[in-house]
Image (tube, coloured by chain):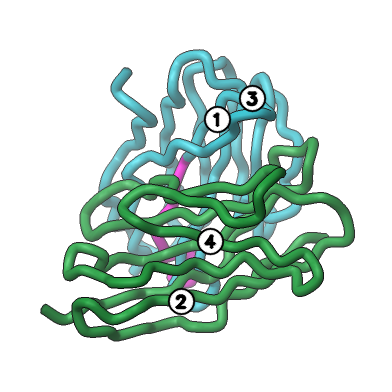
Amino acid sequence: AQSVSQHNHHVILSEAASLELGCNYSYGGTVNLFWYVQYPGQHLQLLLKYFSGDPLVKGIKGFEAEFIKSKFSFNLRKPSVQWSDTAEYFCAVNARGTYKYIFGTGTRLKVLA
Amino acid sequence: DAGVIQSPRHEVTEMGQEVTLRCKPISGHDYLFWYRQTMMRGLELLIYFNNNVPIDDSGMPEDRFSAKMPNASFSTLKIQPSEPRDSAVYFCASSLGDSTNEKLFFGSGTQLSVL
C-alpha cells in the first residue's frame, strides 16, 4: 500500500528565508507526485505535480520540487518565502494508472513579516 | 463552473445522532473522493467513486460510515450514529480522470463537531 511521510509538521520562517519541506513516499511501482496547498480560508489547490520527464518541476508562486527516485522523495522548495506563503502544504501520491490519491499529514508553514 | 460544492459548511450535532454530508462534484468529472482532515492524521482518504461506483472504501473507519453516489452530480457521506471522535473537517473532491493532466478539485469542506 502507498503511504506518504511529511517530516515537518510546523515550520516558522522569516520573510526571504529559503524553504524546503520534506516528503517521502512508500510504493514499489511508478507513481505520480503532487504538492497541494491550503491557504487560510481557501480550498486546497494544486501547487505542482510530477508525472514523468524532468525530475525538477516548477509550480505556481515560485515553488519547485525535485523527484529523487532513489530516495523516494519529492521535496518542495522555494528560495525566498513571502508572508503570503503562510499556509498548510500537503504532499500526495497516486500509483500510476490509478486515481487513489494518498496524502501526507501536512506541514503548517508560518512566515513572519 | 461553480466548483465542488459541499453542504453544510458547519455541522454541530450530539453524540448518537445521524449526520449526512453532501457533495456536488464538478460537472463532467468521473471521479469523486471523500477525505477527512484531522490534526493527528492529516488528510485521510475515506472512499472514492468512479462513474458513481465505489472503487475503494478501505479508508472508511467503521460500519458507522457509509457513502453513496446515486448519480453523477451528487454524493453523500453518512455517519450513524455519530461519535465525538468523528469531529473533523470532511472534504469532497472530484477529478476528470485524465491520466495526462490529472489533479483534484476540492470543495470547501464541512466542519463537523460531535458533542
Chain B display color: cyan
Tag 3 residue: B98
Q: Nearer the viewer, mark 3 or mark 2?
A: 2
- Is there one chain holding both mark 3 and mark 2? no
Q: Residue at x 21, y 68 (%)?
A: A82
Q: Is residue A70 visible?
A: yes
- Is there one chain holding both mark 3 and mark 4? no
State if disc 1 and disc 3 touch (CB < 8 Å).
Answer: yes
Residues drawn in magenta: B83-92
**Which amino acid, mark 4?**
Ala
Chain A display color: green
Classify residue B100 by image quadrant. Answer: top right
**Which amino acid, mark 3?**
Asp
**Mark closest to the chain's N terminus, 4 or 2:** 2
Tag 2 residue: A20
For this rendering, which residue is in front, A39 or A72?
A72
**Which amino acid, mark 2?**
Glu
Q: Label 3 crowding class (10 Å Cα cut-off): few <14, some 14-19, many 20+?
A: few
- Is there one chain holding both mark 3 and mark 1? yes
Q: Secondary structure at mark 4?
A: strand
Indicate whether residue B105 is drawn in magenta. no
